[in-house]
Image (cartoon, helix red, strand yellow):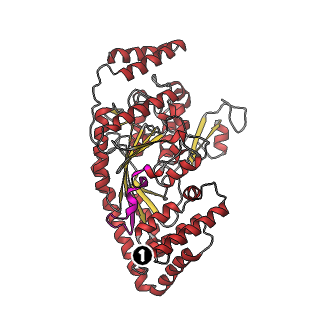
Amino acid sequence: MTLDLSLLPDGGMPWITASGPHADIVLSSRVRLARNLSGIPFSPRAGDAERLRVLHQVREAAADTALLSRAVLLRVDELTANERHLLHERHLVSRELAELDAPTARCGSAVLVGDEAALMVNEEDHLRLQVFRSGFDIAGAWERAAQLERELGERLPLAYHHEFGFLTSCPTNVGTGLRASVLVHLPGLVLTQEIGKVLTGLQQMGLTYRGLYGEGSEVVGNFFQISNQTTLGRSEDELCDHLARVVAHVISREAEARRVLSRDAGYIIEDKLWRAYGTLRYARSLGADEAMNLLSGVRLAVGMYLIGGVSVYTLNKLLVFSQAAHLSLAEGRPLTEIEANLARARYVRGVLAVEAGEA
Amino acid sequence: MLCDQCRERDAVVHLTQIVEAEVTQLHLCEKCAAAKGIETTVAMPKHPLGDFLHAVQLQASPAAGDQVRCAYCQASLRDFRASGRLGCAQCYTAFEGALRELLRRVHGSARHRGHEYEAPVVTGDATALELLRERLQQAVAAEEFELAATLRDQIRALE
């Protein structure tokens, strides 16, 4: 199977438009629900036939739901390593489902991609449904995720325990199976060295943070994914409200840090950010982390109104399309690291030149 | 099982560590464990799953843990200790007592407060029945009679 990304609505990234609230600080809000079918062992312990049966049942049930009736099914188990990397770079599949380092993904691994929701099948749980929203909109994401879950739950017998709630492969997800997360860009707090206090505060509030690509990923480009730590003992609304309240506070701290920066270090910051922009506009070779950090600088400059004429949408697009698997797809062949760095610089230059009206 | 360190005495301390999703297991005798500064209370990793596995260890002695198996998927507490993953939904019933305590540690509560759910009543659910019958055949062939009896009950309930 060849991956035809043009089939995916919004390329599977409805959040990329930067149309949501606080889009200059918050890239996306996501609600994920983990569910399993009763009567079939959890995916890691299930045999191939059972995994295929899960896929078949989920697919039929999803066809009857409002959010996934026109979804595109991608059989992850039939994709090449680069194609799986690509879906991972778009946040459509987790590291676990994509099995990035394996020659093939496990039998029955798949993802259904709809306009507003996506559904991973046979990850560590049979179903991982997720809804992404642009900007800061946890409530919107939860509302849609709940609707989809209700529709699926009416058609599929889900594993549920009267005391423990929805049962999951890993007990850290049991109960609501809900992980709400917000991907925030916090360069102001990093530059003013306030970030440590904020992150410690998050943990004291029962929240956790990770890098751009979730569990196990490093923090690069000042992007932090903030999410709830526990899933049991509180209702879905309580978990979402709590996260939203804390993130709203983090956003105001970031905004305050940016005010402090422009007040106390105006020209130094301005110079630093224009240099980042200059490098992206003219460099001939860009490393992956380097590009991420420079893009972080330009994103901050746009948020502080220091640089005009570059949209947050373009910056979101650059963030995804300048990654290795996307560059490799655009070039139509596998790339060495040096080739990828050259291709990355060429691609970024091109996009920014168009944005500046020079091409 | 022999101690990983001295290879002489029986291992009585089983240490599971998860670092960056990498699971390592160390089996030590009492003496080597003490020499390493590990008593029966092993160092508690910061990761929530680490706490969890640590708690499993405190709860069930390894010998008892090895014996308890889920009748449905045959996963044991030992499997859970090694992987951090349960085998199937029935594991939650099979290991209910241990899990309740552990969930309390990890989540601060063992009671679901989210929305309640009742699975759709699928009368004569062909797929579920078919699946159970398949597993029953396998269980009988493997002479796992205890599992077979459980499966037979489940099939009767569905029929």
The x, y position of residue A132, in whole percent, is 37, 54
Q: Is residue A272 above or below residue A30?
A: below
Instruction: Return the residue found at the far front.
Output: A359
Q: Is residue A106 magenta?
A: no
Residue picked out by circle 1: A302
Q: Nearer the viewer, residue B137 or A252?
A: B137
Q: Is residue A176 left or right of residue A73?
A: left
Residue at (31, 43) in percent of width and height:
A148
Q: How many marks?
A: 1
Residue B84: % across, % down: 51, 39
Residue in the foreground of this view, choosing between A88 and A10: A10
For the point 29% across and 49% down, the residue is: A144
Q: Is residue A180 above or below residue A346?
A: above
Question: Which residue lies at the image location 67% right of the left edge and 58% below the top edge?
Answer: A336
In the picture, the quarter occupied by the C terminus of chain B is top left
Write down the chain letter for disc 1. A
Q: Is residue B63 left or right of residue B9?
A: left
